[in-house]
Image (spheres, rainbow, N blue to C red):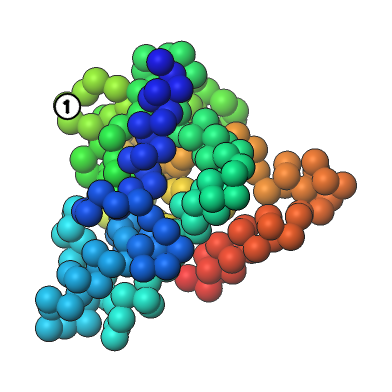
Amino acid sequence: MREKMKTKKKMMILNCSICDVSYDEHQRVPLTLQCGHCFCKECLTRIFSATTTTTICCPKCRHVSAVGNSVSALAKNFSLLAIIQSSTSGSDTNYRNFIDNRSSDSDDDYEEDDDRGGHAIDITSHHNLRLVAKISEGRRIGVEMWRGVLSGCGGGGGRRVAVKRVKIGDGMDMDWVLSEIERLRRASMWCRNVCSFHGAIVMDGHMCLVMDHCCGSVQLEMQKNEGRLTLEQILRYGADIARGVAE
């Protein structure tokens, strides 16, 4: 049963949610809009050709992304490309690692949301955050790391996330802080291999910074290989790190 669910998730993740055709590395390469949602180049080209401006409106959330003269200027979704490449080469390791990090174990609280648009979570529609277990105390007073479950308005299942819980101090301008956090989210959304930051939720006198719950880090990958990264890891992680620094 679990294998069937994983197969279904794989088909959903590797298919464009507009045309329902599998992504590839050419005309249907997965491109990421500035809102974080991902669609194939073919569909985005058709949408862009119907507009008279240099922007494109996301079919899912309606956020307007600056494109320029061609959708080719949009960032490729390298996480999906890595899965596609491993699938075509006969190795499914990258896909299994990708799914295992996003899937639950046997806990019903960790059902995966049906989000076919990419890896980003829309905080505005998934604002029901439940803290499950504290992971650690932060270096500063009032900062904690938690495991949590983020779900939509309809309740039911949810997505497993990591939460940095920060106590709101007296005199803190929350409007300004949240606007700066939104700028950070938009800047980091290109870095799918390195960080997956989804935004902030204010609850119970605390600001909760919501991130993907991941197993491992770049540092751990280096420790496994005598302090080095493989060439594939350098290309995969390095591109995202450089893009994040530039943003």
Answer left or right for 156 relative to 27: left
Depth check: give the residue in front, 61 or 133.
Answer: 61
Answer left or right for 224 relative to 54: right
Q: Is residue 18 visible?
A: yes
Q: Residue at x 61, y 42 (%)?
A: 91
Q: Amino acid at mark 1?
A: Gly
Up-down relation of residue 171 to residue 66 (above or below)? above
Q: Where does residue 3 sit, x and y in percent of width and height?
A: 45, 22
Q: Residue at x 37, y 18 (%)?
A: 109
Q: Using the rendered view, name the quadrant where residue 184 is placed.
A: bottom left
Depth check: give the residue in front, 13 or 111.
Answer: 13
Q: Residues within 10 Å of mark 1 (few under 14, many from 20)?
A: few
Answer left or right for 143 relative to 227: left
Q: Where does residue 21 sit, x and y in percent of width and height?
A: 29, 52
| Label 1 residue SS | loop
Q: Where does residue 38 sit, x and y in percent of width and height?
A: 33, 56
Q: Is residue 173 visible?
A: no
Q: Which residue is mark 1?
A: 154
Q: Residue at x 46, y 40 (%)?
A: 212
Q: Where does residue 25 sit, x and y in percent of width and height?
A: 46, 63
Q: Using the rendered view, name the quadrant where residue 73 is placed.
A: bottom left
Q: Residue at x 25, y 72 (%)?
A: 45
Depth check: give the residue in front, 219 or 50.
Answer: 50
Up-down relation of residue 7 to residue 179 (above or below)? above
